[in-house]
Image: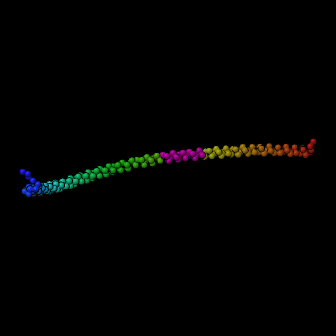
Amino acid sequence: MEVDLVNDPQIWTLLAVFSAIMFASMRYLTHSVTSSLGAKIDALDSKVDGVESRLDVKIDAVGQRLDAKIDGVESRLDAKIDGVESRLDAKIDAVGQRLDAKIDGVEERLDTKIDALANGLDTTVDHLDQKHDSKHDHLVEVIGVRFDSIDHRLGVVEDDLKIIKAHLLRHPAA
């Protein structure tokens, strides 16, 4: 007996019915799994939203507490810095006043020493002027005496030349 399975209409009918049952079952299972998964995903999504909103509230509360603590620390630091700044300003002012007083004292001592040196220099210059004037007067006197001596000697030489001239005129070339 030879069976031609491919051409038998009953087999094709059975295959079609079986395929239809399989596709329908797969469609049902897929739809069932998809809706079940969709419902679970929606439930999970709503839980995540709830957790996210609770986290947002907690994070906002923590942020507000941190802001308040930071503001408190900042105001305490500002107060401490202001206190330190005022103490430093007072110390700097005191040091400035002491330095001004010391500088004024040094300036007064220097002015006194400079005045004393100027007076001493003036006295020395006056003394040197007097010495110079007396030496100048002495030199003028000495030079005057020497010029008088030279003038006298020139007069004598002139007289001698006159005598020689008269002698030569009287005795022409002998």
Residue 139 at what x, y percent from top left?
A: 70, 44
Colouring: rainbow
Residue 165 at what x, y percent from top left?
A: 88, 45
What is the chief secondary structure element of the magenta stretch?
A: helix
Residue appearing at x 92%, y 43% in the figure: 173
Residue 160 at what x, y percent from top left?
A: 85, 43
Residue positioned most to the top = 174
| Residue 55 in view, yes or no | yes
Residue appearing at x 77%, y 43% in the figure: 149
**Quarter of image, res 10:** bottom left
| Nearest the eye: 97 or 59 | 59
On the picture, is 21 further left or further right than 82? left
Indicate whether residue 121 is drawn in magenta. yes
On the picture, is 148 further left or further right than 70? right
| Nearest the eye: 170 or 138 | 170
On the picture, is 165 further left or further right than 105? right
Residue 59 at what x, y percent from top left?
A: 20, 53
Indicate whether residue 76 is drawn in magenta. no
- Highlighted range, magenta: 108-125
